[in-house]
Amino acid sequence: MKNIQVSDYGTMAGGKMVKKYTLTNKNGMTLEVINFGGIITSLTAPDKNGKYEDVVLGFTKPEDYFNGNPYYFGAIIGRYGNRIANGTFEIDGKTYQVDQNDHSNNLHGGTNGFHTKFWNIEVVKDSEFPTLKLTYTSPDGEEGFPGNLKTTVLYTLNDDDSLEISYEAETDQPTIVNLTQHSYFNLSGDFTKEITDHELQIDANQFLPTNSTMIPTGVLKNMENTAFDFTVSKPIGKDINQDDEQLKFGNGYDHNYILNGNGLRNIAKVHHPESGRVMEVLTTEPGVQFYSGNFLDGKFETKTGGKSEKRTGFCLETQHYPDSPNQSAFPSTVLRPGEKYDSKTIYKFSVKK
């Protein structure tokens, strides 16, 4: 397809070549994806003057993605996005132990989760809009998870300036699955600027408070009159420094919101007043993890100069709830043979002048 270009991106320590796929829509919006981690390395969006600029955080050197990607910049997350308490869970009475890579907990599938894997990428030739099909089969026992899990992710760049992400998975043994995309956004296009001036609205009335290691307590808390209330659009920074135990646990926002409605629906909207950029998020998922980039620590250069400092990017990770395998009241993340895991999320960009 003329609107998808393939190029060499970088060489890993073992000599393996990583490829980059650049998708372009009719408006000139571009998406760049590499076959390592299914990582989105760049995504452009227009400002109020019609200027397309990159709005996702990332590294300036390929090897920083290859050598662990400590922030999970732009990556496909699996098998299990977010945290599992003590890295243990039960299915049908059998206990499984997975990697404990975040204090005592499992985070984002473990040290060698999907963000570190080579994904097979095919260009979908009969698609109306530029589309990539990414596939990876996670073998039984990888990072401690049961079953061979065949995973497919589609990235589609539509002409309405939206990025559509579709996830599918099938297993040959009962297992757990919770896939998400871990792009950090900064709608200013300047990755040295904090995202505290971005105005956020989330269609949720409850969130999940956590313990000090960011595992949900099991309580569904109403957000009204708390720092976590984004039912009406407000700047991310407005209440972020309140004297609130939950904000202290996460060093800011790093919490799962219980979304209203079902099916593919509009669940969040972010507006950056200075640039005019707007990002809407649609998903089929029951939850979204809002993360305000609290653990970005200035160790890496940004694509626009300076360093990736605290709160210079935010994530809206659509997903099932953290620690669902251990909390029976939460929507189940168990996938069984013969079933299909099916999920869709759309990030749609526009301008408010």
Image (cartoon, rainbow, N blue to C red):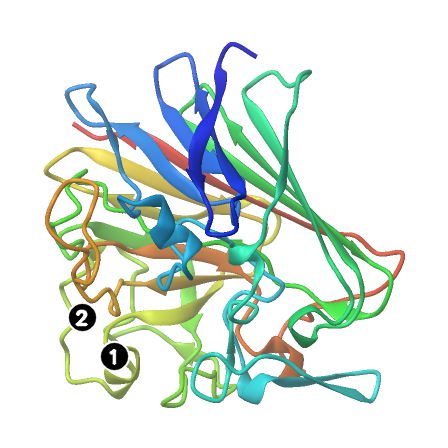
Q: Secondary structure at mark 2?
A: loop
Classed neighbour count for the residue bearing mark 1: other residues with Cα under 10 Å, few (<14), some (14–19), many (≥20): some
Horizontal and vertical percent position of residue 16: 54, 43
* CB-based contact (under 8 Å), mark 1 and mark 2: yes
The N terminus - image quarter = top right
Which one is in front, 349 or 133? 133
Horizontal and vertical percent position of residue 10: 42, 38
Horizontal and vertical percent position of residue 308: 19, 56
**Would residue 147 be found to the left or right of residue 185 on screen?**
right
Residue type, mark 1 in image: Leu
Which one is in front, 117 or 11? 11
Which one is in front, 323 or 113? 113
Residue 134 shows up from this direction: yes
Residue type, mark 2 in image: Ile
Residue labelled with disc 1: 247
- The residue shown at (13%, 52%) is 197
- The residue shown at (13%, 64%) is 238
Residue 54, above or below 167: above
Residue 59, above or below 224: above
Classed neighbour count for the residue bearing mark 2: other residues with Cα under 10 Å, few (<14), some (14–19), many (≥20): some
The answer to which quarter of the image holds residue 40 is top left
- The residue shown at (41%, 59%) is 67
Horizontal and vertical percent position of residue 319: 54, 60
Residue 281, above or below 255: above
Residue labelled with disc 2: 240
Distance between mark 1 and mark 2 Cα atoms: 7 Å
**Would residue 188 be found to the left or right of residue 154 on screen?**
left
